[in-house]
Amino acid sequence: MKQILWLIAVTSAVLVLGCRTATHEAAKTKPIAAKPVVDIEKETPADFEKRIKWWREARFGMFIHWGPVSLKGTEIGWSRGREIPIEEYDKLYLSFNPTNFNANLWAKIARDAGMKYMVFTSKHHDGFCMWDSKYTDYDIMSSPFKRDVVKELAEACKRYGIVFCLYHSICDWYHPDYPLGSPGGKTQKPNPNMDRYNEYLTNQLSELLTKYGRIGILWFDGDWEKPWTQERGIALYKTVRSLQPDIIVNNRVGVARKGMSGATAPGMFGGDYDTPEQRIGNFQMDRPWESCITICQQWAWKPNDRLKSFKECIQTLIRCAGGDGNLLLNVGPMPDGQIEDRQVERLLEIGKWLDKYGESIYKTRGGPYMPNRNITSTRAGNVIYIHVFSWDDEHLRLPPLPVQIKKAKLLTGGKMSFYQTPEYVELFVPEGFRNDVDTIIKLELKGSAMEIPPIPLGVASLTLNKKAKASNVYKKMSEFNASRAVDGDAETRWATDEGTKSAWLEVDLGKPEKFSRVVISEAYPDRVKSFEIKVLENETWRTIFKGNGIGAHFETKLPETTAQVVRLDILDATNGPTIYEFQLFNK
Ligand code: FHN
């Protein structure tokens, strides 16, 4: 008798438990009532422009990658199951207690840096939630810190006039229902349930979009893995816009992004804007874009990570604006909650520059002169700002403008003169008045500058569409073959197999050509550690240049050389080197 009673007690306990967790999960997954689904097709181009106006005019935002992983100084998400064993990684939150975290200070730093919006990682690929979520215990409230970081940042941003925005990863290598796991989405979960995971994702987004006031941008990421589809992306986009109709959503919502170029593949649903990563986007006026770039190398905090110079940061911002795009500059705060002093100093330097010259960036559009290595331009009303980074000659001669110049002055100070004919515009700035970072020439026109069609600049590379071959091509796929590095398209690239440590790219210029400058852009910056540029002379290769890193944009003068066949010989690389463009110029 006693055993039967005991047996009944045990089974009912299990049942209760079972249904509690089930109910708890079920309770956890009871969706928030979504408002009527927004009809995205109905939005006219004018409505769209109105919705993104604040963001276009802002041009500059702060990206923040932060979480318990900062305790290790390794890359967020990707180091799980790679540098950091999964068990250890998933317990980091138990010792994450950033008591020096001050949301007001972060918002103030962003404001003083001249940034107009902040995009914060609410959840990265590692699945840890930086807000108080009722749909999981794997969140900040389960850490010793027990403070809702998203809440505090949302309030602080409001206080400092910064538009608060959220990064949210679609892939979740931690959640048992999401099919793929660490490292890097390369493993399978035992009992995934993608539909239930999608519900969890939608519920958490509904939570984030109803608990913290206005969210300016939903910056999705991690949409590239098989479990995610365009259909799911479109549904999620509609849900998000239903909860906050004026929100802006990037193109990482529906598997539409074409790699690091961040462009949206034709015919795919690309949200509201393109997202080039770790590179400056191409000049593009018919589709909004925003480059996301790290102020150091890693997204999350890394001790002694290489910090970009003031010149590199500010020229990157100017080049984004000149290309008609935004810059989202990333910082990785420390595990105690502070943003590292040297990163803050760099940001405040940028802020000081924008205090003086912000009129040439904020509320401007790109062009009309398209960017080249020396200059880029921005425009607003009847003004064109020519941003000159380097000078080839005494005078800067530009193609003609269809509108007459009323006057020209140096925004960066000093005297200058100009001369305009139907054939060209000539600008003369004495050496002494040139600014090493950016000489800004402000041209006031006798009419609007905004309707002037884009004006291309610069000479084409000698390698453009020339015959090219390589020692290795990624999976022998034509999409990544050698010609992709000389097609003038910064969205395509020559790539090599994973694990490749050295490789060469050879270009036949068709006939002997004289050249004295090289420009190389690496797709995954800083993989190449050393390389040489060689020319073929009498069946022998002669090295004319030795270099170490390449990075997103490498450019240098070469000894004047005349040759027909040229090689970029990558001698050492950390992993399969991949090159967007290899260009040669004769000046
Ligand atoms: O994998 C992420 C990476 O960690 C970082 O978040 C960047 C930011 O744009 N996005 C992904 C790589 O494309």
Image: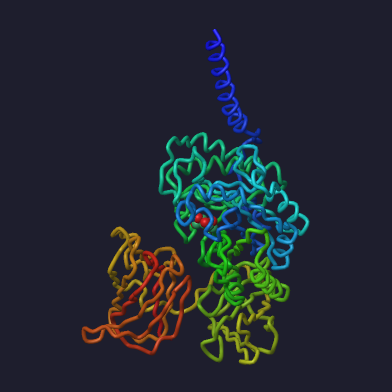
Q: Which residue is drawn at 67% across and 55% down?
A: 98
Residue nearest the viewer, comparing 119 with 287 = 119
Q: In which quarter of the image is residue 398?
A: bottom right
* Residue 89 appears anywhere in the view: yes
Instruction: Check the image and report above or below for 36 versus 398.
Output: above
- Looking at the image, residue 453 sits to the left or right of residue 214; the answer is left
The N terminus: image quadrant = top right
**Please, which colouring scheme is shown?**
rainbow
Q: Position of residue 178 (x, y in %)?
A: 48, 40
The C terminus: image quadrant = bottom left
Residue nearest the viewer, comparing 178 with 293 = 178
Q: Quadrant of residue 557?
A: bottom left
Residue nearest the viewer, comparing 462 with 389 = 389
Q: Which residue lies furthest to the right in this view?
A: 159
Q: Residue furthest left?
A: 539
Instruction: Check the image and report above or below for 565 versus 143.
Output: below
Q: Which residue is drawn at 38% across and 82% down?
A: 546
**How many marks do you count on the picture?**
0
- Looking at the image, residue 357 sits to the left or right of residue 319; the answer is right
Q: Which residue lies furthest to the top in this view?
A: 1
Q: Quadrant of residue 50?
A: bottom right
- Looking at the image, residue 456 sits to the left or right of residue 502; the answer is right
Q: Where is residue 198 in the image (x, y as percent from the top left)?
A: 53, 38
Q: Position of residue 481 (x, y in %)?
A: 32, 64
Instruction: Check the image and report above or below for 523 versus 130.
Output: below
Q: Where is residue 384 in the image (x, y as percent from the top left)?
A: 64, 75
Residue nearest the viewer, comparing 433 with 307 = 307
* Residue 217 appears anywhere in the view: no
